[in-house]
Image (cartoon, coloured by chain):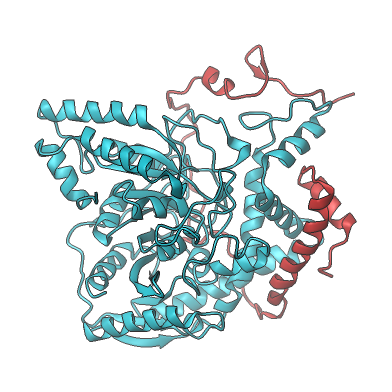
Amino acid sequence: MTDLTRDDVLKLARLARLDLTDEEVEAFKKELSAILEYVAQLDDADVSGLEPTTQVTGLKNVMRKDQVQDYGISPDELLRLAPKTQDGQIKVNRMIA
Amino acid sequence: MSWLPIADIAAKVQAGALTATEMVEQALKTIEEKKEYNAIIATTAERARERAAHIDEAVKKGEKVGRLAGVPFIAKDNYLVFGADTTAASNMLKGFTAPYQSTVIERLEAEGAICVAKANLDAFAHGGSTENSDFGPTKNPHDKTRVPGGSSGGSAAAVMLDMAPFALGSDTGGSIRQPASFTGSVGFKPTYGLTSRSGVVAMASSTDVMGPLARTVDDAALVFDVLAGPDPLDSTTIARDQDGYADGLDTSLKGKKVGVVKEYMESEGIDPGVKAQIEAAIEKMRTAGAEIMQVSLPSLPLALAVYYIVVPAELSSNLSRHDGQRYEASYKDASSLEESYTKSRGRGFGNEAKRRIMIGTFVLSSGYYDAYYRKAQTVRTKLINEFNEAFQKVDFMVGPTAPSTAFKLGENTSDPLQMYLTDVMTVGASLTGVPAIVIPAGTSQGLPVGLQIMAQQRADRALFGIAKGTEALL
């Protein structure tokens, strides 16, 4: 099940929004299959009665006040980093045809 | 010219016996002289000189200038820092100037330390050799034909090349510790959450930690004492040890229970020269009074497989922010938003980032999530339980940092899985969140070997103590 086809790789690339060259698709087909084969050793691990861990120090629901804080950065400074802006907003390509 | 201990530099700058300007100039001169190692992506010379002049001025006025007054340092280029671009060694972020600084950088500056340069790394910290950098590989200070390790390879090399007394690295699966081992420096990976991740380019949020690389345990401890502690900008941060991490450490080995990790020492791939150095180091700990015993973590051989599911999953999510619309490289000729995303990402990300994003996307995709991601996170629980059980019996665990010494440039670049295996001895501490330190333990065939010591979560202070005590024996 871990031998990926060209279509599998293209589907993943589409999900990940990555434009890949043909060479990359071919290389990833082999490399990803090898990596998935390596991690498949977990199939045999007995984890009965155990829950998954996502947070290692046991913190839960760390809350803060919902209030504006001034970090000394203006919206203009942040907008200057964007490739295209207009009227104080980031401009992107048309989404609806 | 080599550097004085960090505490001495700060004391002399405060007393006016040395100036911050002299320190910054020494760092910049060394960086220039040792350019051929490619440890540095850019200097922050202009800002560093301004800050040095400001500190020297303050000293003249008799003001307190901090515990790291005038101490130059180098930040891995995934830290947001003023004075140079923050690229994470990737084409994606070339030309990105940080609008704010990392919390740990702010803390260092508040104590008078001065960032002089940004260090090379594997792009987005993905790698174990610094060969994945879009700025070219860094060379090992001990042998220019070999890698310095990675991903904090530029930081580790810079320290050993005397470019600054210390450097900052980040460690997700061994990225501070393995380069420390390969270069003969001291590298510290704290308990998860003890250092803020705010303002550092994210890799895997459940294991990313920030820490120092230095030449001695004392230097690393002093720097860490400044870095550590809760940050409102990172809700996963935890409280500091009330006694700090630098002063009054218990360095005695007498009666300390030290577990030798069986799965590391008996692993198939371990280089005999590395094993011999580690065994010799452990013998010295025993002679100094430590109670040495073997411990077994049966699931440890699975840790790397867990890591290469969990971490790609997290980083594929974290890197989804780089879509070419806000602050990164952007494909200019797109005719649709979709094309703008895919081409900006396809061109901006290097090979390894793409590979990991693809793996992460696969293990999180519907139909595979339970079999891969959930399973890996559950084996992670098993690993944590085994670490906890072992720490009921011992105070510390020791072993090698990597199966080999520094390998040749190009040796592992054609096989990604082979490169991943260089993390095999460091990912355990990352997945379980425990602190680990690497100290030099001699050489094998002329190349450094690093002893890795691990402690329980939040036992970072005790870990600095035993590391300092052990460093004196080696």
Q: From the viewer's perspective, tell me whether residue B53 is left or right of residue B176.
A: left
- In the image, what residue occupies the spot 28% across and 62% down? B461
At which x and y percent is residue B74?
Answer: 37, 44
Chain ID for red: A
**In the rendered image of this protein, does residue B465 appear above or below residue B63?**
below
Q: How many marks?
A: 0
Residue nearer the viewer, B137 or B278:
B137
Q: Is residue B242 visible?
A: no
Residue nearer the viewer, A61 or B288:
B288
Tell me where residue B109 sits by quadrant: top left
Q: Which residue is the extreme one toward the top? A: A87
Q: From the viewer's perspective, tell me whether residue B254 is left or right of residue B375.
A: left
Quarter of the rendering occupied by the C terminus of chain B = bottom left
- In the image, what residue occupies the spot 65% across and 77% down? A47
At which x and y percent is residue B335?
Answer: 84, 26
Residue nearer the viewer, B41 or A13:
B41
Chain ID for cyan: B
At which x and y percent is residue B196?
Answer: 42, 47
- In the image, what residue occupies the spot 35% across and 75% down? B396
At which x and y percent is residue B96?
Answer: 55, 31
Q: Is residue B4 visible?
A: yes
- In the image, what residue occupies the spot 46% across and 41% down? B79
